[in-house]
Amino acid sequence: MKESGRKQGAASPCAACKLLRRRCAQDCVFAPYFPADEPQKFANVHKVFGASNVNKMLQELPIHQRGDAVSSIVYEANARVRDPVYGCVGAISSLQQQIDTLQTQLALAQAEVVHLRQFIK
């Protein structure tokens, strides 16, 4: 994950500050995780969770855990944008149904192989 949202002394604000139309301070909590060249990443997070809530979550975490937290927040926000009702749970449920279907198909194919082997002997 990219850890530097802006370079020292750079005039370009991070994606969060740009969307929120505010000055991006040197110690901006969003800058390392929401670079200016990825505006949609923060837009979805802001839409789902709100900038203030994400700011509070990040402030409460040790710095070394923030990158993983942002990855999770971004993933959940993107899932919520795609499926506003179920979010990640909908994706997990869909994948679980696919696994169940494929396991059933595999069991049927294995049974057919056993059955066909009886005719070869």
Image (cartoon, helix red, strand yellow):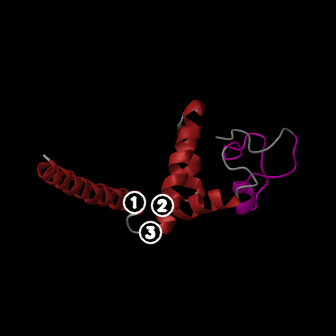
Quarter assignment of residue 63: top right
- Residue type at mark 3 is Pro
Query: In this image, 104 relative to 34: left or right?
Result: left
SS state under label 3? loop
- Look at the numbered discs 1 and 2 and tell me whether their residues touch, using CB distance below 8 Å: yes
Quarter of the image with the N terminus is: top right
Crowding at mark 3 (Cα within 10 Å: few <14, some 14-19, many 20+): few
SS state under label 2? helix
Instruction: Return the residue at label 3.
Output: 84
For marks 1 and 2, the one nearer the N-term is 2
- Residue type at mark 2 is Ala
Q: Where is residue 81 in the image (x, y as percent from the top left)?
A: 51, 66
Instruction: Return the residue at label 1.
Output: 91
Q: How many marks?
A: 3
Instruction: Return the residue at label 2.
Output: 79
Q: Where is residue 112 in the image (x, y as percent from the top left)?
A: 18, 56
Which residue range is magenta in the image? Answer: 9-32
